[in-house]
Image (cartoon, rainbow, N blue to C red):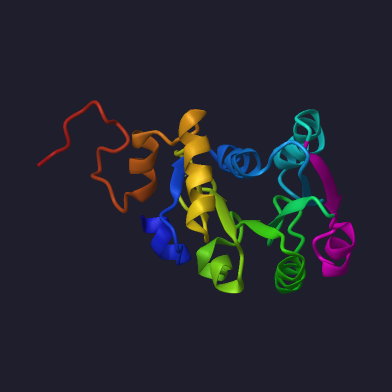
Amino acid sequence: RRIDRLEGALQPGIATSSGMAAVSAVLLGVLNAGDHVIGGNQLYGRSLRMMSEDLPRLGIDTTLVNPGHAADVDAAIQPNTKLILIEIVSNPTLRVAHLAGIVDVAKARGVMVAVDNTFTTPSAIRPFEHGVDILLHSVTKLLAGHADALLGYVSARDAAVMDKLRTFAVTTGMTGSPFDCALSVRKAMPSCWPSIWQRCPA
């Protein structure tokens, strides 16, 4: 719920077991065999591997393009294109996507846009306010803040799409652990942290 509020989410999001679990929930929860997906060619390495190796063997066509040029994204759209996945600022190459242009192109062609907002965080940009359909995070990196939690997050603008994402994540066991969720939302802990086995002083 805290990330929902930070991002201005229109549907309650779901905590996943990692950032890649969030990516997987988006790609596999929304796409079907025979669909086509466009990805930014500067995505996180494992996201690129999933798109270039795993999705094709499941019958999902993938095209990787430079997201800095909306015209390249437009040229890559096919009749069966269902989704575009980008990072606004890429991990780790720090290349910037043309978000507004991509959203405009996608809306004109009836294609959903998913944004990995891990590196920018809602303190820099809130993608839902720019027309994005699906938002995800690797909470592990910046939002958790203490470098000791393994967690992801995903939310969608549309309730039906969010239901698909939640159902797939729960069915495949991608949900986040309660302990990592607790680590991610804490503000300040007693001086005995992280020695959780000893009693904290009064």
Outermost residue to the top? 197
Q: Nearer the viewer, residue 40 or 194?
A: 40
Q: Residue at x 42, y 59 (%)?
A: 4
Instruction: Please state the horizontal and vertical placement of residue 183, each as a whole percent of the image.
Output: 36, 42
Q: Is residue 76 magenta?
A: yes
Q: Is residue 160 above or below residue 25?
A: below
Q: Where does the C terminus fall, quadrant-wise?
A: top left
Instruction: Please state the horizontal and vertical placement of residue 27, each as a whole percent of the image.
Output: 66, 42
Q: Is residue 126 above or below residue 134?
A: below
Instruction: Please state the horizontal and vertical placement of residue 66, each as a whole percent of the image.
Output: 85, 58
Give the residues in magenta: 60-78
Examine the image and state in which quarter residue 70 appears: bottom right
Residue 141: in sight, yes or no? yes
Q: Nearer the viewer, residue 119 or 174?
A: 174
Instruction: Please state the horizontal and vertical placement of residue 75, each as a whole percent of the image.
Output: 90, 62
Does residue 18 appear to the left or right of 69 in the view shown? left
Residue 152: in sight, yes or no? no
Does residue 137 appear to the left or right of 60 in the view shown? left
Q: Where does the N terminus fall, quadrant-wise?
A: bottom left
Q: Nearer the viewer, residue 129 or 2?
A: 129
Q: Residue at x 71, y 56 (%)?
A: 86
